[in-house]
Every structure is written in C-alpha cells, then in structure tokens.
Image (tube, rainbow, N blue to C red):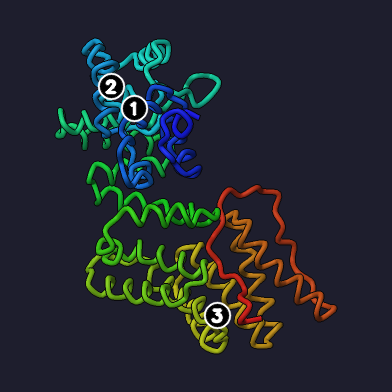
C-alpha cells in the first residue's frame, strides 16, 4: 500500500517481497528505499542490488545510529560486524576482551538493530542492512584489522567444533593455507554423513588451482562428483589428483589406493563391471592402512563380483566389508554390505551371514558406492 498505493512506484509483487525481506520489517528503512526508488527506470535492478551501502541508508544509519554511540560501543559494533552471528564468548575471543555478553544485552535493550536467534538470548545477529553498514565502516576505518578478527573467529569456531564457520572465516581472512588444511582434515566426516553440499561449498571458497594442486582436496572433489552422478567430472578430478601426486614429493599415504577405489567406483557407475572388478581387485590387494578406504574397496569389490555372477566370492567380500564397518563403527557401510548379503540370501534361498550386528551407535559413515541403474 505504501510503495504502490501511496508512492505510486509500480513495483512488481516479487520486488516488494524481496525488498521486504531485505528491510526485515524496518519501517524507516522501507521509506528510505522508496526515496531511492523514486524516478528510477529500472526499479527491479535497484531492488535486487539494494544493500547497506545505499546512500540514504548509510546517511541515516550513520547519523542517527552509529555516530551517536559511545566510542567503546561503536568499536564493538563495527569490529563484531565480521560475524554473521554473535554470542558473548565468541565476541570476547574476536575482540580479545571480556564482558561482551553484557554489551550484547545493552545493544538489544537500546534497540540497535540486534536480532535474537534463540529464546535464551545467547545468540544474536545484526539486522542485515545495519551489518552491511558496519562492515563498510570497518573496511574503511580499520582495514588492517579485518584479517585478524576473522582469524580469531576461525580459531574460536574450530575449537567449538563448528567447522563450517571456521572455514568461512579463514577464507575471509585470506588464510588459504589454513583453510585448505582444515578442509582436508574434515571433509571426510562431513561427506560420510551426507553433507556433500557443505564440502562442495568449502571447496568453492578456494581457488581452483589450490584444489587441483592438493591431492587431498582433489580426492574430495572426485567423491562428490561420483556421488552426484557426474562421472566425467570425477574422472577429471582423479586425473588432476594423479598429476598433483606426481608433482609432489610429499608422502601421499593411502591416496594411491583410494584413487584405485575411485576409478573402480567410476567404472561401476557407468556399468563397466569388468573394469570395475579388475580395479576393485587391485584395490583390495593393496596395503589399505586407512579403514575407510578399505571398507570402500571391499564394498566395491563385492558389488563388482556380485554383478559378474560370482556370488559366493561376493558374499566373502561383503562379509569382510561388514566386519570392517563394525570395527570402525560405520553404520552406512555395514548397511550397504548387509543389504547385499540379504539380497544374495533371498535370491539363492541359502547362505547365512555371521553375526556382524553391533550394539554400538556409530556417528560416522564411510564413503562407499551406490549401485547405479546402469549396473542393475
């Protein structure tokens, strides 16, 4: 009613909804946006790009909100703007100070664009337009401290076990080396519980050249590509990883074995059972020091044997995989192996499986291939 009925801006319903989301119910902000829209020919483009650096928003928030604050409070607001969510302990760590919880309570009482994220008032965030103004001010006034603040935030989140936040702050700090090592250490656990998009998002934060040059990350890209059905991309990443290993003098650990497993899975995904069987057999014959890789190898070997008609051998491979899965408390790997064992028993009407069930409740799961429609 205000934008189209009173001010006759003629906005599309979708633009009004988008503007409402950006303004977050701030009536004065809505009017300031309307002032900026007046006389513009391409109103949709303006709404799409509307942010906290709009001159009307900047002038209002700077003059009416930020400039009137005490120096300590202003510094707190500006420096904590690097955070997408805030808590007392986190702000203490980022600012290298104490008493941030009380400061947040004061900011909320003073209605300074702070939004609580839980009923206990432990976590907050700034109104997005206000946060954008604060970040602009931080980069203008104290650009050299920005990486320091992000690194402190990354350290706090990493200690708290919040890897996603830690990765984002490390990349925002420009610490690509630290971000690379953290992703390399944590991607397996994330993918094993189905968070492919999370890991893919982390890798997208890094320069492609960095990912291509690091075999640990190339492996991650290859598994993601396979699990999302992009076998050509997977083959490309496997090749890039092999090139990176050849160019590196560092200890590759179990990576060569995992590359063989990856190629076996890739062939299985496109229905090339003969090649998959050969590669999987090669993989299980290697010294698989990593139980995760060993489990994937035996699952793949069992699958290739099964679809080659070698049912008895497939049973042995799956039984070994199930024991490995139980050993490392890997529920999905165990379910995969036991599922195939159950199918074999149902189809043959015979064959028993050992007691590989466990009362344990594992928290992790290994990467293992899924049977594709092309192979079935």
Q: In whole angstroms, how far apart are the C-alphas of marks 3 and 2?
A: 61 Å
Residue 310's spot in the image, x, y percent?
Answer: 67, 86
Which residue does the image show at 37% across and 14% down from the upper left?
107
Residue 305 location, quadrant: bottom right
Q: Which mark is residue 60?
A: 2
Residue 337 location, quadrant: bottom right
Q: Nearer the viewer, residue 43 or 234?
A: 43
Q: In whole angstroms, how far apart are the C-alphas of marks 1 and 3?
A: 59 Å
Tag 2 and tag 1, C-beta contact below 8 Å: yes
Residue 126 in view in this figure: no
10 Å neighbourhood of mark 3: few (<14), some, or many (≥20)? many
- Mark toward the start of the polypeptide (1 vs 3): 1
**Disc 1: which residue:** 32
Mark 3 lies on a secondary structure that is: helix
Q: Is residue 64 above or below residue 6?
A: above
Tag 3 and tag 2, C-beta contact below 8 Å: no
Q: Nearer the viewer, residue 297 or 207?
A: 207
Residue 35 location, quadrant: top left
Mark 1 lies on a secondary structure that is: helix
Which residue does the image show at 32% across and 22% down from the upper left?
92
Q: Which mark is residue 268?
A: 3
Which residue does the image show at 33% across and 47% down from the upper left?
42
Residue 335's spot in the image, x, y percent?
Answer: 67, 62
10 Å neighbourhood of mark 1: few (<14), some, or many (≥20)? some
Marks 2 and 1: which is nearer the front?
A: 1
Q: Nearer the viewer, residue 21 or 127?
A: 21
């Amino acid at each position: 009613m205000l934008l189209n009925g009173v001010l006759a801006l003629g906005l599309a319903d979708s633009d009004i909804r988008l503007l409402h989301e950006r303004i977050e119910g701030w009536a004065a902000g809505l009017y300031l946006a309307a002032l900026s829209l007046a006389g513009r020919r391409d109103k949709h483009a303006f709404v799409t790009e509307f942010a906290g650096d709009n001159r009307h928003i900047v002038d209002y928030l700077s003059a009416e909100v930020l400039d009137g604050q005490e120096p300590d409070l202003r510094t707190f607001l500006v420096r904590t703007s690097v955070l997408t969510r805030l808590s007392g302990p986190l702000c203490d760590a980022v600012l290298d100070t104490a008493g941030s919880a009380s400061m947040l309570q004061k900011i909320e009482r003073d209605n300074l664009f702070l939004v609580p994220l839980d009923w206990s008032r432990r976590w907050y965030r700034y109104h997005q337009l206000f946060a954008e103004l604060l970040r602009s001010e931080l980069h203008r006034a104290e650009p050299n401290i920005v990486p320091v603040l992000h690194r402190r935030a990354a350290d706090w989140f990493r200690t708290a076990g919040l890897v996603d936040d830690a990765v984002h702050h490390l990349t925002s700090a420009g610490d690509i080396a630290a971000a690379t090592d953290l992703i390399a250490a944590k991607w397996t656990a994330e993918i094993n519980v189905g968070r492919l998009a999370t890991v893919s998002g982390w890798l997208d934060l890094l320069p492609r050249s960095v990912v291509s040059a690091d075999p640990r990350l190339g492996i991650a890209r290859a598994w993601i590509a396979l699990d999302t059905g992009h076998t050509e991309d997977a083959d490309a990443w496997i090749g890039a990883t092999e090139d990176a290993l050849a160019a590196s003098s560092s200890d590759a650990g179990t990576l060569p074995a995992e590359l063989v497993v990856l190629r076996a899975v890739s062939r299985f995904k496109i229905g090339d059972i003969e090649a998959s069987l050969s590669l999987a057999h090669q993989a299980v014959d290697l010294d698989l020091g990593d139980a995760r890789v060993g489990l994937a190898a035996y699952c793949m070997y069992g699958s290739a044997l099964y679809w080659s008609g070698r049912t008895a051998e497939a049973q042995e491979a799956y039984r070994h995989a199930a024991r490995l899965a139980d050993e490392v408390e890997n529920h999905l790997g165990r379910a995969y192996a036991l599922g195939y064992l159950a199918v074999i028993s149902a189809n043959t009407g015979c064959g028993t499986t050992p007691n590989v069930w466990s009362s344990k409740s594992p928290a992790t799961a290994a990467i293992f291939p899924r049977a594709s429609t092309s192979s079935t």
